[in-house]
Structure formats: structure tokens, C-alpha cells
Amino acid sequence: MLTSVSTNQQADLVGDLDEAFTARVTELLDRIEERLADSAVADTDFVTVAAQHTIRAGGKRFRPLLVVLAALLADDVDEDALVRAALVMELTHVASLYHDDVMDEAELRRGAPTANLRWNNTVAILVGDFLFSRASSIVASLGTEYVELQAATFARLVQGQIAETRGPLDGEDLLAHYLRVLEDKTGSLIAASAIFGGMVAGVGEPVLKALAAYGEEIGVVFQLSDDIIDIASDSSGKTPGTDLRAGVPTLPILLARRSTDPSDARLLALLDADLSSDADLSEALGLMRAHPAMAEAREEILRRAEVARGHLAPLPEGTAKQALAALCDGVISRSS
């Protein structure tokens, strides 16, 4: 077991590990989970409930897991600093979800109604700001180098969101633009999680650079696997075709749009159409699930996961390094 919130998800991501190591990871993640809810307590019951809403819906806790695994590269680690570093990463991530759901007009997050649906957009945005402030308070206790990385990461998150909102410039390659958005919106925070863990562990600069490169790549892979899940899965906790209906240009859709095969005319027409009709969405999902673009997208995920694995070479040998490598396989399996 790896944590009470998302045991199966995290077990699937890291595979079978040394029993003592797994027990330690479990204990740390449980402590993080307990502190996570406490960190969202506000001066009023209403703000507390709203701030804990997405936290209590669960999640994969991928970013705290990365902090833990990277920190355990050291034999002797300050566990309190480790927990605080993980809290900063997850609180920042959850805060960004409140804002994302407003911009995406999402109605479901982790199998539960989104905050913007339960209350309204204004409440959701302000609660996201509240959680950002909690993350900022905690990161200040870790030291200026952590604050600097957190600030730089937040800047990338915002710029990635702006780039996504604005869309590609005239003549810009759509896929290249999309991947740059993912690097800023997703890869940056996951890379920071790996770096935070390495900083807690006290590893040297070459290992920190390796963790940064690994985190950046595995973060993009993680999001690309979500692109496939949006189309292929009926049991992810998110309504199938949410991105498809919203017109989000995910990897499989961008690959399918490159088709010049006349038999894809109906699919391409649906991708350009209003998919508010359940019947049209269902048809589009069926056509996408059968399209070669899905296999092509899975191949790209596999390729990038191997790139991520290669970045781990400078890390010291041990169970923590093995667990980080196993994450590459776990992320691949999510989209298979």
C-alpha cells in the first residue's frame, strides 16, 4: 500500500519495490496527506470546506510522490522538510486546478463536482488564490532557494496558461505549440517536485540537473497519457471526451487532424463541429478510439518515457532510483 488516498494508482505507478522502502514511502505520503488537509484550513468554515473540496476528492498525488522518491536518494533525510516540500508542490497544483476548471468550464474533477459548479467561478478563483498563499507560506520556511524555484515555476505555469488561452500564432506548428504549453503548465511543476526532493536530499548539482530533466519529461508524458485517457477511458473519474467536447487540441486529436485520408472526413468534420450533442460526442469518441492516431500517440508516450528514464543515469544507485525508473513504466501503463 502506498497511501490511503490513492493506493492503487500509486502502486500501479511505481510497481513492486523493496518492502521496507515501500513502507517508508507509505508513511511519508500518509503524513503529507494529513498535513495537506490541515494546510487548507481557513479562518471561516466556508473557505475551509471550499479549499478542502478538491483535496478531499483524492487524486494520484504524483507530485508529492516525486518529492518523496527524490528525497529518498539520501540515506538520511530531514523528513519534516520533505513533507513541507511536498505540501508546497501539491498545494500549488491543487490551486491551479481551481483556476483551470473555471477557464475550462469543467463540471467534474476526480469524480466530484468542481468547485466552480458547486459554488461559482468567483469562489473557485479566490479559493485557488488562498491555496497559493498557503503554498507560499510553507515554502518560505524552507529557504530562499526553494522560494526562488517556486516563483520561477509559478511564472512558467502562468505563461503556459496564457499561451494556451491565446492559442498558436499564425503559421506556428500546432503540435509544437501544444507541447510547449504542456512543458510550462505540467512539466514545470513536476520538474520542480523532483528538484525539491533532491534539494531536501542534499544531492549535488549534476543530480539536481538530472532530476530536473527527468521531471520535465515525465511531466509531459504524464499529461500526454491523460490525453489518451480522455478519449479511451470510461472509468477515470472524468467524463470521457471532456477535452474533445471543449475543443482542447490534445495529442491524439492533433495527430488525427493531420490525416489526408478521405475516410476521415466525417471525423474531421466532427472535430470542427459543436460537440454539445451527446450523440455527436459519442460518434466522435468512437471514431477517435478506432483511429491510428491513438496508436501513434501511445508510441510517442513510450518514446518520451524512455527519454525520461535516460535522464536518471547520474543518480546514485538504490531503491529510490529504481522507483523513479518504474514511474516511467507506470505512466506508460496508464495509457495502454
Image (spheres, rainbow, N blue to C red):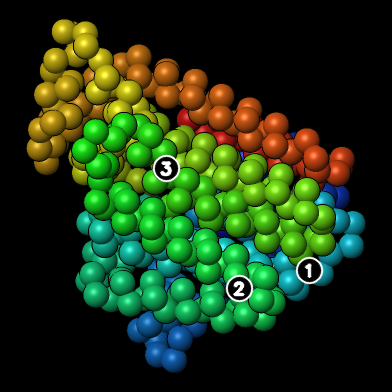
Q: Amino acid at mark 1?
A: Glu
| Residue 119 figure quarter | bottom left
**Residue at the spot 74% in from the left edge and 62% down from the top edge:** 199
Query: Distance between the Cα atoms at labels 3 and 2?
Result: 24 Å
| Residue 290 figure quarter | top left
Disc 1 is placed on an element classified as helix
Disc 3 is placed on an element classified as helix
Query: Distance between the Cα atoms at labels 1 and 3?
Result: 34 Å
- Which residue is label 3 attached to? 180
**Residue at the spot 74% in from the left edge and 57% down from the top edge:** 198
- In the rendered image of this protein, does residue 202 appear above or below residue 220? below
Crowding around mark 3 (Cα neighbors within 10 Å: few <14, some 14 to 19, many 20+) is some
Query: Distance between the Cα atoms at labels 2 and 1?
Result: 19 Å
Q: Nearer the viewer, residue 245 or 260?
A: 260
- In the rendered image of this protein, does residue 257 appear above or below residue 173? above
Disc 2 is placed on an element classified as helix
Q: Position of residue 7 (x, y in %)?
A: 61, 49
- Which residue is label 1 attached to? 79
Q: Is residue 247 left or right of residue 272?
A: right
| Residue 115 in view here | yes
Identity of the residue furthest to the front in this view: 171
Q: Amino acid at mark 3?
A: Arg
Q: Amino acid at mark 2?
A: Val
Q: Position of residue 60 (x, y in %)?
A: 54, 51
Q: Earlier in the sequence, mark 1 or mark 3?
A: 1
Specify the label residue 147 is tagged with. 2
